[in-house]
Structures are given as structure tokens and as C-alpha cells.
């Protein structure tokens, strides 16, 4: 049986760059404070009127072009996002229409920073069972719309961006070799947006109390994230009868450079094998791994036959890993 693999990638970043020095003018912080704690120097911010679906279509077209496919070849569209255009309808349905894809199964998936990997595993099942030939998986976030620029714990971290991958059958040994996804709601209150849902609908008070912005307890999440990423990475390597030394590239979710560094040390891999762009892009949640993947694919950092490990940890909390051969 053929495995499911990636046929093309593409990304779309907003033009506006927000530097640490820009943030110094908005909140009590400094370039040194941000850099030392996160590794971030700058991030992108969407322009007024720019939407998640609009940037998603741009990224999707680039991914389809690399795959040498048309939008009408798609059988399924999965949009992983926690910053949709609107609560109803799904952002995926807006993407399907604007992209010019034929009527096909299209839906949103909400797993925060792990979302792109969750989407890949769903796409893998459709492809391997023959229910879909080509699947578009998108990681899309405009998190600047949900940032409180009075809260330096969050506003310095998150940025906007979108990236996409077209998935289809891949001839072995290429393709996804192992994957594993997890969720543990015990830590749900560590990273969340309090208001705007059925638990706390929008009111004048929720707006005044700034409850529609991202809230995070970063210190509590750090240890859980590092431990979870190491464990799930080792499990997918074990499932494929491989070890970390054989990896050509590790693409972790770009949450925090200190988390990336801690994971690298625990897996005992050289820094040259771990890709990072958080200094330029910040934390783009579900878009971070596919943005990195597209940069690597177009920048010549990946060649056919390379063994790639992608791993992520996010709100929910969710975490997972995908091991694939390019």
C-alpha cells in the first residue's frame, strides 16, 4: 500500500512586520526581555481587512502549483485554525469557494498549535483508505486579532501567518511512517480565550474585562510541553524502528526557542538538524510547522529520501508528532 505524503507546500505571510522595538512603545517590555525569554525578534501582523481565508487561498495556490495540481483536483480541504473568519460558516468553506475548488468535503479543525499535524493525520486516513486522492491541509492563524497589547506575556509571542500542504499518495519508502496525537483537557485553563463561546457569550462586561483575548500561564506549560514533545517524538521513532540519530531534520512547533533548545538536548541531536524561524515569524500556532516546512522545501534544506520529524504542543492541551520520509 502506498503511504500518504506531501506533494506541495506554500505559505502566505502578511507584509507588516512588528519588531520588539515596536512593542516597547505599546507595553512595558524590552527587546532584551523578549529575546532572552522567547528567541523572538519580530513577527507579522495582518492588515485591516486581511482575513484568514484570504491568506489561506494564497498559500493554497502556491502549494497546488508546486504539486502541479488544480484546485478542482482536491477531494478534501482541512483548515486548522483557532482564528476563523467568523464562527459560522467554516473558514474551509470560504476557502473552497474562493480557491475555485469543486464542491468537496471541507471543514475546520481546532487543535491550536498542534492543528496542522492533526490535519495531516486525518488526511492520511482519507488517502490510505482511498476516500480521497488529493487533500489540502492548511494551518492558518491571525492571532493578532486576539492579542491584548496590555499583556506582555502574550502580545510579544504570537504572530500571523498561513501555510498549506497538498497531500496525496507517495510511493514507499516516501510518505508518513508514523504519527501520534494526544489531548489532555486537564491543562485547558493554561492557554485559552475566556469569552466568546457558549460558556461565556459576548457582553459589554466581557469586552470591558478584556476576556476576548488570549490568556496564558507560560511557566506551567513549559515543563509539560518539553516532556510531552520528547515522549511523543521518541514513540513515533520507535514505531518506525528508527532512532533520532537517523533524522535529517526536526521541525518543531515554533512556540519558544527555549522549548526547541530543550527538546534538541533531550533528543541528543545537533543544532544543525533542528529548524527554527521563530526569531523572524514568532509563534503562529497551527501555521508554524507548515511555514517552516515550506521554507525548508523551497530553500533546498530538504531532499528526496530525507527523514523528517515534526512535533507540536498547543492549547487544549494538544500534542503530537509526525515522522515522514520526503
Image: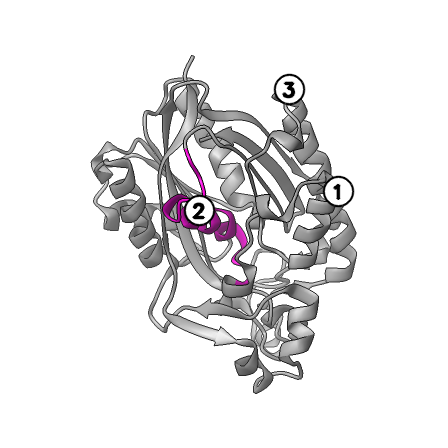
Q: Horizontal placement of 312 versus 160: left or right?
A: right
- The answer to which image quadrant residue 101 occupies is top left
Q: Horizontal placement of 86 versus 278: left or right?
A: left
Say which label, 3 or 1, has the lower sequence index. Answer: 3
Which quadrant would the N terminus be assigned to in this image? top left
* Element at label 3: loop
Q: Horizontal placement of 199 versus 127: left or right?
A: right
* Element at label 2: helix
> What's the CA distance linking mark 2 and mark 1?
23 Å
* Element at label 1: helix
Q: Is residue 286 magenta?
A: yes
Residue at 33% x, 51% y is 59
- Res 90 visible: no
Q: Residue furthest bottom?
A: 25
Q: Which residue is mark 2?
A: 296
Residue at 56% x, 45% y is 111
Q: Provide residue 117's location: percent of width, then percent of height.
A: 53, 39
> What's the CA distance linking mark 3 and mark 2?
25 Å
Q: Which residue is mark 3?
A: 241
Span shown in magenta: 282-303
Q: Provide residue 279's location: percent of width, then percent of height.
A: 55, 64
Q: Which residue is mark 1?
A: 266
Amino acid at each position: 500500500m502506498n503511504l500518504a505524503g506531501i506533494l506541495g507546500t506554500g505559505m502566505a505571510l502578511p507584509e507588516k512586520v512588528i519588531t520588539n522595538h515596536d512593542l516597547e512603545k505599546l507595553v512595558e517590555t524590552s527587546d532584551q526581555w523578549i529575546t532572552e525569554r522567547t528567541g523572538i525578534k519580530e513577527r507579522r501582523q495582518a492588515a485591516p481587512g486581511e482575513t484568514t481565508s484570504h491568506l489561506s487561498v494564497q498559500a493554497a495556490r502556491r502549494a497546488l502549483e508546486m504539486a502541479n495540481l488544480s484546485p478542482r483536483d482536491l477531494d478534501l480541504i482541512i483548515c486548522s485554525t483557532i482564528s476563523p473568519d467568523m464562527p459560522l460558516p467554516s473558514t474551509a468553506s470560504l476557502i473552497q469557494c474562493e480557491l475555485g475548488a469543486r464542491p468537496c468535503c471541507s471543514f475546520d479543525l481546532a487543535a491550536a498549535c498542534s492543528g496542522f499535524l492533526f490535519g495531516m493525520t486525518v488526511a492520511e486516513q482519507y488517502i490510505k483508505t482511498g476516500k480521497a486522492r488529493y487533500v489540502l491541509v492548511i494551518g492558518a492563524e491571525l492571532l493578532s486579532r486576539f492579542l491584548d497589547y496590555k499583556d506582555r506575556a502574550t502580545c510579544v509571542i504570537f504572530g500571523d501567518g498561513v501555510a498549506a500542504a497538498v497531500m496525496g499518495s507517495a510511493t514507499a519508502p516516501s510518505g508518513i511512517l508514523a504519527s501520534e496525537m494526544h489531548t489532555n483537557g486537564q491543562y485547558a485553563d493554561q492557554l485559552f480565550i475566556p469569552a466568546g463561546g457558549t460558556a461565556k457569550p459576548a457582553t459589554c462586561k466581557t469586552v470591558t474585562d478584556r476576556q476576548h483575548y488570549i490568556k496564558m500561564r507560560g511557566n506551567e506549560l513549559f515543563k509539560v510541553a518539553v516532556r510531552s514533545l520528547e515522549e511523543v517524538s521518541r514513540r513515533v521513532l520507535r514505531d518506525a524502528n528508527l532512532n533520532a540519530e537517523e533524522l535529517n531534520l526536526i521541525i518543531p512547533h515554533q512556540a519558544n526557542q527555549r522549548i526547541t533548545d530543550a527538546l534538541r538536548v533531550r533528543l541528543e541531536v545537533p543544532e544543525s538538524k533542528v529548524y527554527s524561524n521563530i526569531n523572524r515569524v514568532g509563534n503562529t500556532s497551527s501555521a508554524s510547522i507548515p511555514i517552516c516546512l515550506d521554507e525548508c522545501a523551497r530553500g533546498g534544506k530538504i531532499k528526496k529520501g530525507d527523514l523528517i520529524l515534526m512535533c507540536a504542543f498547543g492549547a487544549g492541551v494538544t500534542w503530537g508528532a509526525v515522522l515522514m520520509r520526503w
